[in-house]
Image: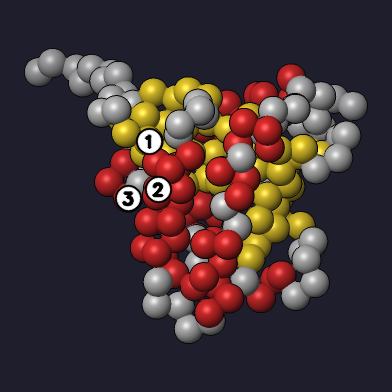
Amino acid sequence: MAAPTHMEPNWTIRPFRPGDALAVRRLIESVWREHFHEHPDAFVRDFIYSRLSDVDNADTVYADRALFLCAIAEGAIIGTGAIKGFNDRECEMVRMFVAPIYRGRGIARTIADGLISFAGNAGYDRIRLSSNNALTASHRLYERMGFQLTASRDPGGEAHSRYYALRIGGR
């Protein structure tokens, strides 16, 4: 019997490029609809739609000590993730989304690993993130990567989200 062979992924990771905004927006909105289309709380249901200006302006928002990554398969954007500065020592991991048919292939982990590496090289020593309470698969990923639950940064935020932090670097 032949030993299983390692298959190369059929996707790649690259930085956000000018012209990606519409496809990134569509991916994020479709994943949000998948999880929250019928959510009873309108705040949660509609949360993402008014909060994508960073995608529309990614060339400037993710320019200084920031990075926006896209996973590409068959010429389409199938995953995203970004790091943006919060202050001189902390950054935030945001926009972690993967299209449903591409989940379970290591895409989110590869994006997150790239973002963590970038953050360390950029001089940050702490990454924080928030994730909606319903996104339990995301929580498992973050926890496997060493992120620790932390207090809410937003008054009342714990009603909808979990907050995580990861120490990186040696400062």
58 shown above or below 171: below
From the top left corner, tell me how far across and down residue 46 is, in percent: 52, 70
Secondary-structure class at tag 3: helix
Q: Which residue is mark 2?
A: 27
From the top left corner, tell me how far across and down residue 41 is, in percent: 53, 81
CB within 8 Å, label 1 to label 2:
yes
Q: Quadrant of residue 3?
A: top left
Q: Nearer the viewer, residue 33 or 8?
A: 33
> What residue is shown at x 80% (from left), y 30% (from top)?
124
> What residue is shown at x 45% (from left), y 25% (from top)?
13
Q: Which mark is residue 142?
A: none
Number of the front mark, 1 or 3: 1
Q: Mark 3 Cα within 10 Å, few/some/many (few <14, many 20+)?
A: few
Q: CA distance from mark 1 to mark 2?
A: 7 Å
Residue type pointed to by label 3 = Pro
Q: CA distance from mark 3 to mark 2?
A: 10 Å
> What residue is shown at x 62% (from left), y 45% (from top)?
54
Q: In terms of sequence position, does the residue under pointer 3 or pointer 2 come before the other?
A: 2
Q: Which residue is mark 1?
A: 77
155 shown above or below 19: below
Left or right of residue 1, residue 142 in this image: right
Total tally of numbered discs in the picture: 3
Q: Which residue is mark 3?
A: 100
State the quadrant of the C terminus.
top right
